[in-house]
Image (cartoon, helix red, strand yellow):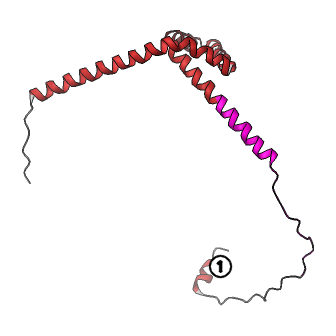
Amino acid sequence: MIQKQGKFNFINAIFGVVFLVFALIALFWLAKGIFTILAWLAPILLIATLIIDYQTILGYGKWILHQLKTNTLVGVAVSLLTVIGFPLVSFFLFGKALLKRKIKSLETAYRADVDDNFTEYEIVDEDPVERLELPPLQKRKESAADEYERLFD
């Protein structure tokens, strides 16, 4: 089968580049809009995180302090990124607090289910009524496979 070699079409390349530029601009405006909405909601999310589970925020602060003590450069970078990305950090901490609350509620429900319900059982007599009689064992006939297996004993 003979394939016809396509020629480079300059118009298609221009349309591709223009489409790529418009797609990147649309993604930028979408990200900017989401970040703006999160910036307005960040204080509310932070207060809600404090109400739900204040340990989440304390844990994050302790982690930053630990980073500053152990690896100063990384600690400074994380601190700067926390200030710059405050809306994203508050959203992340809010989600983490919600997840921790859900895990705690599921754990308490599981504990209540396991601890409160007893398993029903029946007392069985320890002395069997009669012994089970088995027929005597019969020896197998030896075959070539048995001789082969005896080589590894």
- Rendered location of residue 24, percent (x, y): 29, 21
Amino acid of disc 1: Arg
Can see residue 15? yes
Q: Quadrant of residue 48?
A: top right
Residue 18, located in which quarter of the rendered image?
top left
Q: Mark 1 falls on what kind of element?
A: helix
Task: From the top left corner, tell me how far across and down residue 76 is, in percent.
Answer: 56, 10
Apparent side of residue 18 relative to residue 89 in the rendered image (left or right): left
Q: Is residue 1 magenta?
A: no
Label 1: how many Cα within 10 Å (few below 14, some 14–19, many 20+):
few
- At 64% across and 73% down in the image, what residue appears? 152
Residues 125 and 151: in front is 125
Q: Position of residue 146 (x, y in %)?
A: 62, 82
Position of 110 relative to 89 (above/below): below
Q: Residue at x 90, y 80 (%)?
A: 129
Outermost residue toward the right in this view: 127
Q: Position of residue 116 (x, y in %)?
A: 81, 45
Residue at 9%, 31% (x, y): give it. 9
Quarter of the image for the C terminus: give it: bottom right
State left or right for residue 124 relative to residue 46: right
Is residue 20 found left or right of 10 in the rendered image? right
Reply above or below: 152 against 54. below
Image quadrant in which the N terminus is located: bottom left
Name the residue: 14% across, 24% down: 14
Q: Is residue 17 above or below residue 109?
A: above
Residue 85 in view (yes/no): no
Seen from the viewer's position, the closer of residues 9 and 92 is: 92
Where are the magenta residues, as a range? 100-129
Q: Provide the residue designation for mark 1.
A: 150
